[in-house]
Amino acid sequence: MPTSTSGAGPQMSAAISATGLRKSYGDKTVLDGIDLTVPAGTVFALLGPNGAGKTTTVQILSTLVPADGGRARVAGHDLATAGQRVRGAIGVTGQFSAVDGLITGEENMLLMADLHLLPRREGRRITAELLERFDLGDAAKKPAATYSGGMKRRLDIAMTLVGGPRVIFLDEPTTGLDPRSRHTMWQIIRELVTGGVTVLLTTQYLQEADELADRVAVLDHGKIAAEGAPEELKRRIPGGHVRLRFTATDAYRDATTALPAGTRDDASLTLRIPSDGSQRDLRAVLDRLDDAGIEADELTVHTPDLDDVFFALTAGTGPTRPHQTEETVR
């Protein structure tokens, strides 16, 4: 779950703010007037299917492409009038690695230090510190082409940090990584935010947003379909329920009488009762069963997750949907 929420709130300044951002390519509207506010020192996740406008949003806010309309401020600087100052305050890790495989990891880092016009001694110091921090010290002298996918991604982010950015844009940073490398990357992102960095993250991994983000915006067809904390968005989606399974026909029949709001499945002797997943709701179901002297053989609590949010708001487009979050009590 997010670790950077302490201190986050209305009183915090916005590291990123955008109003009415628009972008079209020919007759195709990619962004249709989106508004965003990202408090400093938090993780903000943009979710959406392919083509929803996530990468275009990052490209505009990181000054890579101009917006057709709207206004934005990043790290306190106006995007339209102070682009150079914005570039000096941000770091960007795109979908495709910026690592040069023909040179070593250390040389990649030193190249970034030169691009940031750091004095040679300071550049070497920062390079050494970041390589150790990202567990790349032992591989520093090896060609980056020999690195695994996870190592290249860590080097990519380390290169992004050479200039000490206050705001980092991570565009699908864990795409193609194995589960272990993905979890390592999550830990790195948490550590960055703990150090005061603001992260705007785009991802198609719903679990990733749930694990990292303080706030989530769901982007679809160039518009913000919904925005809020992950738990807040989950509460907006119907479908939570308590599922009771019985092996005895008599107990099942009695339960359908005691819980008339439930949906019956006579073939499998299961009963599904609408629930928001709260302790209060679960206790109410259990109290009704206890009062009637009924014992279920299996009780499962199903709660909507970000997958449900994504599919409800984007008409089912996007990544393959895994199972709904559930907890079973036998």
Image (cartoon, rainbow, N blue to C red):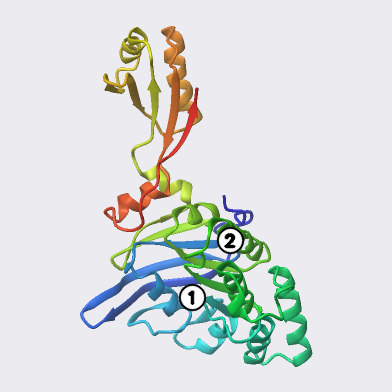
Vertically, is 92 above or below 118?
A: above
Residue type highlighted by circle 1:
Gly
Residue underneath mark 2: 181
Q: Could you tell which of marks 1 and 2 lies nearer the N-terminus?
A: 1
Left or right: 53, with 105 as reference point: left
Q: 121 and 275: which one is in front?
A: 121
| Foreground of the two, 204 or 2 | 204
Q: Amino acid at mark 2?
A: Ser
Residue 201 position in % (x across, y down): 49, 66
- Identify residue for label 1: 94
Residue 23 found in image quarter: bottom left
What residue do we see at 26% from left, 75% from top?
29
Instruction: Identify the residue at image location x=47%, y=67%.
Output: 172
Question: Which residue is drawn at the image coordinates 33% and 10% (left, top)?
Answer: 249
Choose top left, top right, bottom left or bottom right for residue 324: top left
Measured as percent of width and height from the top left, residue 122 is found at 76, 86
Residue 194 in the image, given as x and y percentages of width and height? 67, 61
